[in-house]
Image: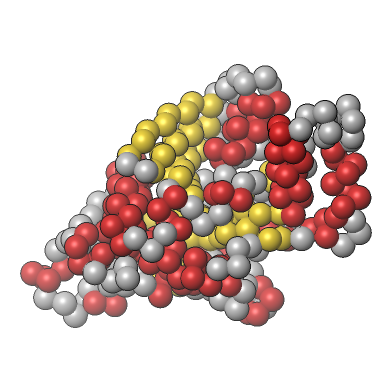
Amino acid sequence: MDSEQLIQIGEIHTDLAMEARELAMERSGGSEPAGVNTQTEKQGDTLITRVNIETAEAGQAIGKQPGFYVTLEAPGLRTHDRDKWEEIAFLMAKEIEGYIARFQLGDDDPCLVVGLGNWSATPDALGPKVVEHILVTRHLQETAPPEKKGGLRPVCALAPGVLGTTGMETGEIVMGVVQRTKPKFVVVIDALASRSTQRMGATLQIADTGIHPGSGLGNKRIGLTPQTLGVPVIAIGVPTVVEATTIVQDALQEMTRMAPSLVSPKAVNQRELIGRVLSPYLNSLIVTPKEIDVMIEDLARVVSGALNIALHPAVSPEEVFRYLT
């Protein structure tokens, strides 16, 4: 998980740019930070938010790297409705295609897909699970006849694991693979943290700023960014966890709304109360849904389906969606 992008504003942690923007606006009385442009669009049940952080000052104001972030809030991700999955995967594919066009990449430019995370820890296994469903074609380019190559991008995929199981920095592994395979761009998938329980497993973020693997525990790792890899990077993440402090704070805010005379800022110091409830050992507790196993499998199918559509022009959505269930 990405703690280089994990920000702290009033002790509320989030990896999502849209949430970072919301928190910054709360602190500033509701005004949009200078240098941050936001657009929203509703497609069916999915709300698409596009946040463009134009300057370093704007990024510092909300705690994110300058870049372009797209967030899809899709409650249908938490259902088992095949039609919803297809709709969300198609919307996500369109956004990924927008990034590819912005990078001025052609249909035949090779791509490396990297699934970050620990396949032995279910909440952090999204990246490796997505890689299992990616249509890899790089190894076929030399043997396939020319008439069969059209519309199939050379794609290779990698799930490098984590430092604790490989003894190697994920960044070191990926940098070595990039130097050897020479992709024109890299797609990185990782699990994220949200400050909202409602967004767990129901939100997709796409960004062009890259990601810092393994730093969700406060460890400084080599970033997988355009600067370190030397090629454009599309980072895709889904929040699968929240911190215990977020749940307690949400509960206190709801109690304040329902009974302001009982739990008001004047009646109790909420920050102090949260510290008492969670100390000494629960302060760093990470919470994930009980159905996380099913959630990760479902998310992996949708994300990989969207990637297969976006990366391979010759692959029709119907062919991809056939494997979503």
Return the residue nearer the eye: 257 or 288: 257
Return the residue nearer the eye: 181 or 238: 238
Q: Position of residue 103 (x, y in %)?
A: 35, 44
Quadrant location of the C terminus? Answer: bottom left
Q: Residue at x 30, y 52 (%)?
A: 87
In this rendering, does residue 224 appear at all? no
Return the residue nearer the eye: 104 or 99: 99
Vertical order, 310 against 134 (above or below): above
Return the residue nearer the eye: 314 or 245: 245
Quadrant location of the N terminus? Answer: bottom right
Q: Position of residue 244 (x, y in %)?
A: 74, 54
Q: Residue at x 36, y 36 (%)?
A: 42
Q: Position of residue 158 (x, y in %)?
A: 45, 72
In the displayed structure, does residue 182 sit left or right of residue 216? left
Figure label count: 0
Vertical order, 206 against 148 (above or below): above
Q: How is the image coloured?
A: secondary structure
Q: Residue at x 56, y 54 (%)?
A: 200
In this rendering, does residue 255 appear at all? yes
* Residue furthest out toward the left: 147
In the displayed structure, does residue 311 sit left or right of residue 245? left
Q: Quadrant of residue 316?
A: bottom left
Q: Position of residue 121 (x, y in %)?
A: 62, 74
Q: Residue at x 44, y 35 (%)?
A: 50
In the displayed structure, does residue 18 sit left or right of residue 300? right
